[in-house]
Image: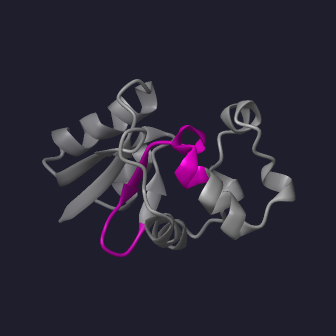
Amino acid sequence: MSVTIYHNPRCSKSRQTLAILEEKGVDHDVVEYLTAPPSQAEMKRVLAKLGMKPADIIRKKEAKEAGIDAAAMSDGDLIKAMVANPIVIERPIVVSEDKAVMGRPPENVLFII
């Protein structure tokens, strides 16, 4: 099995989730999404695998600082804003071939590995 982790190395939860993947010997790709943001299409695929709406994975404080009002935006516009301002995306997100989980708490990753 191989997974992709959307990772922020400055985030303790993201580091803990990555450590679980490494401890379990899971083949993984690391995407440091702040420097390599997902495309709109990729974000839509991740959301579908999570079974969530864009507003469900928005970091509220960072969105407010970026001037993003998730409650007033359509899903499409919110995805565009997330891609343009990746700091507002909750992390980490771990994606397998057919599903995804938020690594909050980090142990959530155990559900897909």
Is 83 inside the magenta-drawn segment?
Answer: yes
Residue 85 lies in quadrant: top right
Q: How many marks?
A: 0
* Residue 59 image position (x, y, % from top left): 65, 40
Which residue corresponds to the image point at 46% horizontal and 57% vertical from the top-left? Answer: 101
69 above or below 77?
A: above
Left or right of residue 12, residue 28 in this image: left
Q: Residue furthest front?
A: 84
Left or right, 92 with respect to 82, comes to left
Q: Residue at x 47, y 66 (%)?
A: 46
The span picked out in magenta is: 82-99
User: Looking at the image, is 99 positioned above or below residue 102?
Assistant: below
The residue lying furthest to the right in this view is 72
Residue 22 screen position, x and y as percent = 18, 40
At 17% across and 65% down in the image, what residue appears? 1
Compared with 78, 48 (above or below) is: below
**Residue 4 screen position, x and y as percent:** 29, 56
**Of the pair 110 and 62, the residue shown nearer to us:** 62
Residue at (29% x, 39% y) in the render: 18
Q: Is residue 69 left or right of residue 59?
A: right
Q: Is residue 78 left or right of residue 87?
A: right
Q: Is residue 45 magenta?
A: no
Looking at the image, what colour scheme do you see?
one colour
Question: Measured along the vertical axis of the image, is residue 59 above or below residue 37?
Answer: above
Assign the C terminus to one quadrant of the image.
bottom left
